[in-house]
Image (cartoon, rainbow, N blue to C red):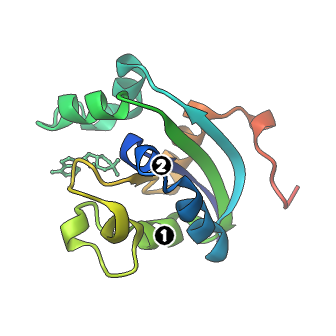
Amino acid sequence: MFERTLAIIKPDGVRSLVIGEIIRRYEQSGLIPIAIRLTQLTKEQAKAFYQVHCNQPFFNDLTSFMSSGPIVVLALEGEGAILRHRDLMGATDPSKAAEGTIRKAFGASIDFNVVHGSDAPETAGKEIEFFFTDSDLYSRTE
Ligand code: CMP
């Protein structure tokens, strides 16, 4: 199924200067960027984005980290984009991620795991809308 997904290169990825390498991996696996922005979330925006985790013990650390520096947000489009992106990222905990995945290559820990990706079509739609308006999205299929 042709899908869209949201990718975030987190503050650790931006600080490590691997933006280009990560986008290269997306493009080479058929995940085509249709919108890209470098931005920094406020703590409040990070809390709103990760609202689904608000009762988790890691919520405060997660939202502090996600608002600690610039991030790169991308809307990606391609066949099976959501799962394809999750496969490219690897497991949430880099120590459990498969060889060749982004988190295995660049992630330091579950808290500093370099990238975020939508986990289902409904969340992908909401997450893309959180950062982009329709007129920001340059789909090749339209
Ligand atoms: P992400 O895909 O951005 O979604 C929520 C983030 O919370 C996750 O990546 C991790 O970086 C972070 N996190 C910290 N502890 C946990 C945990 N125990 N389970 C899931 N996510 C966690």
Q: Look at the picture and state if 120 lies above or below 88.
A: above
Q: For this view, does 136 lie left or right of residue 83?
A: right
Quarter where residue 27 is shown: bottom right
Q: Between marks 2 and 1, how big is the CA–CA gap?
A: 17 Å
Q: Where residue 140 is drawn, which disc sits there?
A: none
Who comes first in sequence, dot 2 or dot 1?
Answer: 2
Q: Disc 1 designates what residue?
A: 83
Q: Where residue 9 is drawn, which disc sits there?
A: 2
Residue 2 in view here:
no
Q: For this view, does 127 lie left or right of residue 4?
A: left
Name the residue: 76% across, 37% down.
Answer: 136
Q: Position of residue 127 (x, y in %)?
A: 52, 40
Q: Look at the picture and state if 58 lies above or below 82.
A: above
The amino acid beneath tag 2 is: Ile
Front position in the image: 48 or 110: 110
Describe the element under mark 2 as helix, strand or loop.
strand
Q: Residue furthest right?
A: 142
Describe the element under mark 1 as helix, strand or loop.
helix
Quarter where residue 1 is shown: bottom right
Name the residue: 25% across, 36% down.
Answer: 62
Q: Position of residue 116 (x, y in %)?
A: 41, 51
Front position in the image: 70 or 4: 70
Name the residue: 37% across, 17% down.
Answer: 44
Q: Quadrant of the C terminus?
A: bottom right
Q: Position of residue 95 (x, y in %)?
A: 19, 69
Q: Residue furthest bottom?
A: 99
